[in-house]
Amino acid sequence: MAFSNMNLKMCGVILLGVGLAACEMDNPAFGDDELGGSGDTSASESGESGSSSGSDTTDATTTDTTTGDTTTGDTTAGDTTPGDSTDTSTSDSTDGSDTGGVEMCMGEFGDPFVPIYGETGAFNGQCPPVVTSQYLRLTGVGLETGLVMGQRCMVAGCDSCSGTSIPVGVVGLDDFSGPLGELLEQGLSPCIKVQTGPILGIDGATRCTYSSIWIGAGNPIVDVLLASHDPAALPAAGSTLLGDNGIPEVGDTVTHCPCESLFGPGSEDLGCCLDSMTEPAVASLAFAGADVLPVGMAQVGFANGLWNFHVAQSQVRPSCDNPEGSAETSWALVRGN
């Protein structure tokens, strides 16, 4: 069920699982453009086509012969530290009796996944604007679950690797970092390949963050991770991985929430939310036969095996930073057992 066929403002507070047949006017949030990703996901943008069959392809990149990095150009990275999202707990009460008359929000507004590749100290203070193709030889696990550490390599196969180890991955995805960590414990040094979407900025730990990331591992390289921070351009190999499945779309479950349940009295964001043409809402995401609510996971299967489909965000949350109530969607695919 797409949000684009209904007026969120007129729908009111609707409990989890209740349909929206009573809404009549169109709402711009969660429309096809929002869910489809506003960026171009063609191979021409990232300079390489990935392979869902696991076979590696010819890299069309420009390589820095000093660092082994394959991106060029200057960028000024902005602060994109996550954590501003409001987590709301589920309650059995919806009459406002326990919250001073404010209706409880039955949906969960979560933080996005944040793809990470490197940190500023490894790139002379500036993060690469995009990573079109980079091999790394893994040297250890990261300080946070979901991250691994690796040295950049000059050529495919992870030969000629040197320099400071950098963090790579998505915080929280232990089903990505865990299997690689087990190989490291066995004395192996896995080889991975990385592609990213456009840069987001720098987090509080000076790590470089990106709108999306694809990672392959092994010899030959096979897909192991694809993660999207929000509707944005995917790496070329990520688009190839999805194939005919397309990207995740709004699912069958829609929950509306009052602005007052997200922002306290006197909050500037409360005024912006109330003035918006859209109403806060949370939806499930549907992909490859699964329908998953935010902060949930389901295993899905398609041509190249089983995958864990994680959903971090599928929400509309009008605020002063998002007055039009643009949709926020963040999800990840991690190769399953």
Image (cartoon, grey):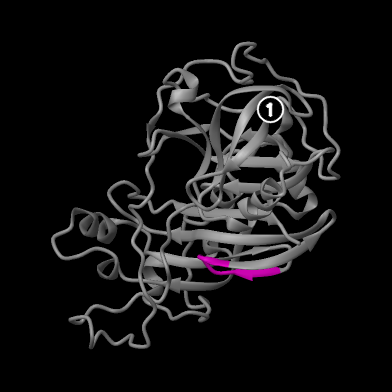
Horizontal side, residue 152 vs residue 245: left or right: left
Horizontal side, residue 5 vs residue 316: left or right: right
* As drawn, 57 above or below 82: above
Can residue 31 be spotted in the picture? no
Quarter of the image with the N terminus is bottom right
Quarter of the image with the C terminus is bottom right
Image quarter of residue 293: bottom right
Disc 1 crowd rating (10 Å Cα; few below 14, some 14-19, many 20+) is many
Q: Which residue is mark 1?
A: 133
State yes or no: residue 294 in magenta: yes
Horizontal side, residue 310 vs residue 240: left or right: left
Can residue 169 be spotted in the picture? yes
Residue 165: x %, y % from top left: 56, 31
Q: Which residues are magenta?
A: 290-296
* As drawn, 239 above or below 103: above
Residue type at numbered disc 1: Ser
Looking at this rendering, what residue extends furthest in the left direction?
A: 266
Residue 101: x %, y % from top left: 20, 82
State yes or no: residue 186 in magenta: no
